[in-house]
Amino acid sequence: MKSKAILISLFVPVLATGCGRSKVEKDVDPALPPGAVPVAASATEVPSLTNGVPSPLPGAALEVKTGPLSFAPVAKSADPSVVTIYTLGEEQEQSFFSRGKRGTRAAKGLGTGFIVQKDGVIVTNNHVIDGADEILVQLSDERRLRAKIAGRDPRTDIAVIKVEDAKDLPAIALGDSDGLEVGDWVVAIGNPFGLNHTVSAGIVSAKGRGRDDVPLDPSGYYSFIQTDASINPGNSGGPLLNLKGEVVGMNSAIRGGGAQGIGFAIPINMVKQILPTLLRDGHLTRSALGVRIRDARDLSADDRAHLKLGDEKGAVVEGVEPSGPADRAKLEVGDLIVAFDGEPTERSSLLQWKASTAGVGKTVSVRVIRQGKPFDLSITLGELKEPKRVVRAKPAPRVDPDDDFFTR
């Protein structure tokens, strides 16, 4: 993580920009759009789409998981796959005496990464390598090797770098972040403040933290794992491990304001989902429904009554992009989306993620509730138009792998 603090701001989740149609009053018995398949009342009670959490059965035994006597086996097995990432670039500076003229100065960065393929593929945060002209990777045996950016996605803060001429590097196993439970033990390894290969341990404090909980880049896609394992500047890009030594998250952010024991990691399943595309294309082309949404849980009691919503959770359509995929499928403002492609979407951020990574041109089934009536609708996804990043050409400073990086 670079030394500069991450700024915090608030934002409402958006799937795709565009003008929304004006809100219209709904009939008592709304007409379904063409192609909609009504859902029988019993079908809405399928466990995979219910929003409530069942209570434990009376007399059910409580399963208790015990922690290890030592985290040493986890640290020992994972440590060879954890690397220190040094970056060197340029940043603009303005002198008080230069009357508005700007110069440049060398900017050094420090972060962490972990090896996922023996040929030198390393995963880290995008903000670790953002703006870097030169990247050095230091392995656990203290070898320093040059690396290049293989792919990056700023909106998820995920990046992939590739060590040049590498072979037989110790790749780490990737686990299943969906299988994590609040209260599970986790271990973090990283380089806080340059203290290489520091190990800390804690538990999963919460899951599914989004923009409202960790307000970062307003255009980002977030579903963080919250942990009280100690994370500090320099830990960014490092692995969060389960007790099997598998990576279940990538440590990425800390809460501002002097908070202690509150760190956030990107679920490894998000990384695994886009990793092949980043390696192949160098970037991620996102798909889109073409709607603007918000969490149903944020609606007022009057709004819920007007839309005839009970305790359902999901994403409420606030705007529909004209001539977009949702518009062509006849989705309307006020519709509640509760499932996407057969999976429940209890939060708008989850629907945003699923819709953006499903694939341009893919036809998916969307379960919608309109004025209390559930139905399934097929929608062919379009492409999310994103602003192009302007990259200025500038001379790249050279880094000597044998040089002391911090004395340059």
Image (spheres, helix red, strand yellow):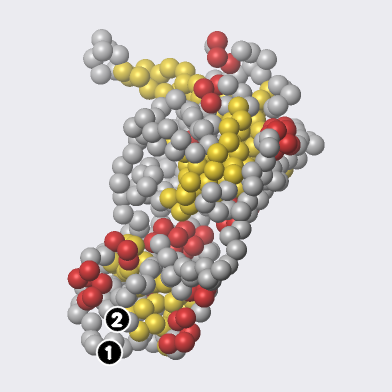
Q: Are marks 1 and 2 in contact (CB under 8 Å)?
A: yes
Q: Amino acid at mark 1?
A: Asp
Residue 352: image location, x then y, percent: 43, 60
Residue 8: image location, x then y, percent: 33, 39
Residue 252 seen in this snapshot: no
Tag 2's secondary structure? loop
Read off the residue under disc 1.
Answer: 29
Read off the residue under disc 2.
Answer: 371
Question: Toward the viewer: 258 or 31?
Answer: 258
Q: Residue at x 43, y 17 (%)?
A: 105
Q: Is residue 22 above or below residue 374?
A: above
Question: Toward the viewer: 49 or 7?
Answer: 49
Residue 61: image location, x then y, percent: 60, 63
Q: Is residue 38 above or below residue 353?
A: below
Q: How many marks?
A: 2
Q: CA distance from mark 1 to mark 2?
A: 8 Å
Which quadrant is the C terminus positioned in?
top right
Q: Residue at x 46, y 35 (%)?
A: 261
Task: Identify the image quadrant of residue 400.
Answer: top right
Crowding at label 2, few (<14), some or many (≥20) Cα neighbours within 10 Å? many
Q: Residue at x 41, y 83 (%)?
A: 375
Apparent side of residue 16 relative to residue 356 in the rendered image (left or right)? left
Marks 1 and 2, the one that precedes in the sequence:
1
Residue 95 seen in this snapshot: yes
Q: Residue furthest right?
A: 168
Residue 112: image location, x then y, percent: 58, 32
Q: Residue furthest front?
A: 59
Q: Amino acid at mark 2?
A: Gln
